[in-house]
Image (spheres, rainbow, N blue to C red):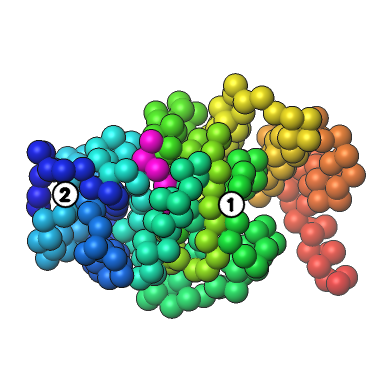
Amino acid sequence: MSTTEGLEAPLVTILVPCYQYGRYLRNCLEGIFAQTIIDQISVEIIVINDASTDNTDAVMREFTDPRIHYIRHDRNRGLCYTLSEGLTLARGKYFTRIDADDRWKPHFLEVTLPELERYPDVALVFGDVAHVDEQGNIINEESTIARSLEVHGDRDFKGDRFLSQVGECTIGTAGVIGRTEAWRKGLPFPKCFTWESPSDWWLNIMAIRDADVYYKKGILGEYRMHSASMTHQQGSVDAVDIEQTTIGAINEAFSGVNLKREHRLARRMIYANAWTTLGNINFEKNRGKDSRRCYANAVLWRPDYVLRKSIARHFLSSLLPRKLYEKIKKGVKKMF
């Protein structure tokens, strides 16, 4: 693998973090080299193996392209450390990350880079991301497109998306590229990040806090759904870590930001929705006082949420003994 010392800075840095994804890594790298303009622009490809014990090293030996810089950790450092390392090492004007289990569409770089070059006030350019199964078969492209139609309309979009991104991660990791300096605004990761899955959400938020985004209509990448993905592992994450990371990140995102009145109203909804989601997570895990505390916080931010049937139902249900709750739940299902 190559070293970057003494080389001219590339236009684009591509980071590929990999932990136990050797079985997908070849497909990911092939997707990078299949980019329609990969040989027309200067790129560096940083692959960071976070101490995998699978066949990642063997797969990497198959790729001898001098543009690849391969790093192997001697012990598992975690996703936040790996992303920080990649961003710190990046020499490109633009930076993009593609996880080892995901894959780009061949035109990803071709359609996104021109928008970054055209609009200096744009920090990130992104498109839609299709969900695929372990074999790479598309499983719900329609729902992804439907969500984009709802948010952006049936067209490209340029503008402010800070508040909407804080409220919901709508920028898929497998379909976004941005200015390296914009991404670095999210470093170092806040101490609240005891749950690493939303690291991309955090970096996106900080990159666009004072800059525009450009949404490019169409599917630009593929996010692989499988049992080892972070999305599927959320159920095993401690609710305390999810709460600490989520609320802490929102607090940090709004720190020092001067919001207009209408934006302050949006902020209240963001907090209320976050606490509602945390209440639902705690309800599913233990139905105890933590779920009631989260629902109460949601109502503090938005008093009208007390009228939401789901919140009221869960709040009251959490007061019941589990056996009684399950008995009532079964009885209601039989009625309908």
Does 244 appear in magenta? no
Considering the whole magenta stretch, tell me its main secondary structure. strand
Q: Is residue 179 magenta?
A: yes
Q: Which residue position is annotated with label 2?
A: 69
Furthest residue to the front?
118
Identify residue type, mark 1: Lys
Crowd rating for badge 2 (residues with CA inside 10 Å; few <14, some 14–19, many 20+): some
Between residues 112 and 87, which one lies in front from this camera angle?
Answer: 112
Residue placed most toward the observer, 266 or 330: 266
Query: Given this view, does label 2 or label 1 mark the residue nearer the observer?
Result: 1
Numbered mark located on residue 158 in the image:
1
Q: In this rendering, does residue 162 appear at all?
A: yes
Residue 175 coordinates in the image, percent (x, y):
45, 59
Please give the name of the residue rendered at 60% of the width and 33% of the height, measured from the top-left corner: 250
Please tell me whether residue 204 is drawn above or below residue 301 in the rendered image: below
Choose the circle earlier in sequence order: 2 or 1.
2
Residue stretch rendered in magenta on the structure: 177-181
The residue located at (12%, 43%) in the rendering is 7
Secondary element at tag 1: strand
Q: Position of residue 159 (x, y in %)?
A: 61, 47
Disc 2, disc 1: CB below 8 Å?
A: no
Position of residue 176 in the picture relative to residue 32 (left or right): right
For the residue marked with disc 2, what is the amino acid? Answer: His
